[in-house]
Amino acid sequence: MARLPPIVAAAVALSVAAPALANPQSAALRTQAADQLYNLDRDEAMATFRRAVAADPSDAGAYRGLASALWLSVTFRRGNMTVDDYLGKVARPNGKMPPPPPETATAFREAIDKALALARARIEANDKDADAHYQVGSAVGLRASYTATVDGSVVAAFRSAREAYSEHERVLELDPRRKDAGLIVGTYRYVVSAIALPLRLMAYVAGFGGDRQKGLRLIEEAADYRGDNQPDARFALILIYNREKRFDDALKQLEVLRQRYPRNRLVWLETGSTYLRAGRPADAERFINDGLERFSADQRPKMFGEDALWLYKRGAARAAMGKAAAAEQDLRKAVSLEGRNWVHGRAHIELGGLALKAGNRAVGRSELQTGITLCEGDNDAVAVDEARRLLSR
């Protein structure tokens, strides 16, 4: 079940405030904080979630929203917030990731524990309270994602994931109109259907359901539902549609998110990346150029290795278009900057391909070998296979 939590993490990464029995002030602040978080105004979002907590200390959604913002601050520092991180095994690098700041880890645990305590108390008072079950499932699902991606404990994450799945199935049983509960249920169903048979049997025994098509349908319904986790479902669909090679569908979701969150430059990066996977490098370059202008003008903190990632993506697009000189300039700059191993590795592989096309076999082989070593360090099997294919030629 080792691959389950990282994929699910992408789907529930932004599981912020959901419908809860909060006072109007807290509810309004949660909405404002969620908008700030999706627009990459992370510090402002945390401050606003804390104001929501102060406005209504009994609002479980406010505490969970704060926990989400704290968790995202960790993933942002680590540089693993893109679709690429979850398409394969890249999200579980071989190298040890830096631990989160102790104060952030403590604040996350306190916020998620408080959210759970409040929601569980409501269930004790009324076991048929669908929203209380929703709050429990969402909080436990968030804890599963944090445990898998930050603590690196797959077993502990599996236990939380199972509870999250069960709680949201209970929501759908109590109130079938709550399509927002389909996000977690659908994501786990989709993931379970894709894993190897022995692990899939273990998942069934543990209580997870399968059925890829049903899982995808549940997520799509959540994306159409006007709940507070609607953007979460859209981000999940972008990941899944890329995995399914349904690139046009992913691009439609990205268009919606660009319009709704214009300050989130990473949505432009994901748009360019999706066009690149779709074999449309000219469109990829156009969006990446637009995103790079936003990146350069943005004075807010950058994601770890973000500048190297932007340049690698543009270099790859330019290489695919036959713009060898411009591509090499981008790729050389990318490998000179701080970044993730898989980003540097893929840039070296692109450089190797350019060298081979230019007839420089020695440089090409050297770049490809370097790329293989770096990509293996981030479990980037797809890139390693591509490099070895080029070497074999």
Image (spheres, rainbow, N blue to C red):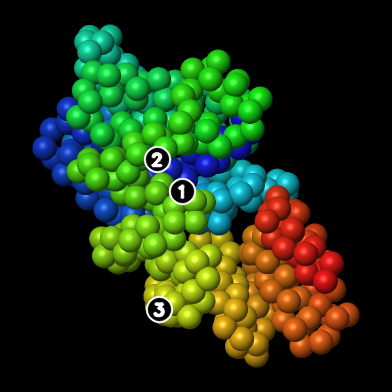
Q: Nearer the viewer, mark 3 or mark 1?
A: 1
The first of marks 2 and 1 along the sequence is 2
With 26 as the anchor, is 70 left or right in this view? Answer: right
Relative to residue 378, is residue 176 drawn left or right? left
At x 28% / y 22%, what residue is drawn? 171
- Asked which secondary structure carries label 1, the reply is helix
Please count the marks in the image.
3
Q: Which residue is mark 3?
A: 290
State the SS at label 2.
Answer: helix
Q: Position of residue 48 (x, y in %)?
A: 27, 47
Q: Say what secondary structure mark 3 lies in.
A: helix
Residue 279 visible to an observer of this rendering: yes
- Which quadrant is home to the N terminus? top right
- Mark 2 and 1 residues: CB-CB less than 8 Å, in contact? yes
Figure quadrant of residue 317: bottom right
Q: Residue at x 73, y 76 (%)?
A: 353
In whole angstroms, how far apart are the C-alphas of marks 3 and 2? 31 Å
Q: Quadrant of residue 141?
A: top left
340 w.r.t. 186: above or below: below
| Marks 3,2: beta carbons within 8 A | no
Compute the Cα span from label 3 to label 1: 25 Å
Q: Earlier in the sequence, mark 3 or mark 2?
A: 2
Q: Which mark is residue 216?
A: 2
Question: Which mark is on residue 334?
Answer: none
Q: From the viewer's side, name the closer residue of 251 and 375.
A: 251
Name which of mark 3 and mark 1 comes first in the sequence: 1
Q: Residue at x 44, y 77 (%)?
A: 283
Amino acid under disc 3: Asp
> What distance separates the C-alpha of mark 2 from that of mark 1?
8 Å
Tag 1 residue = 240
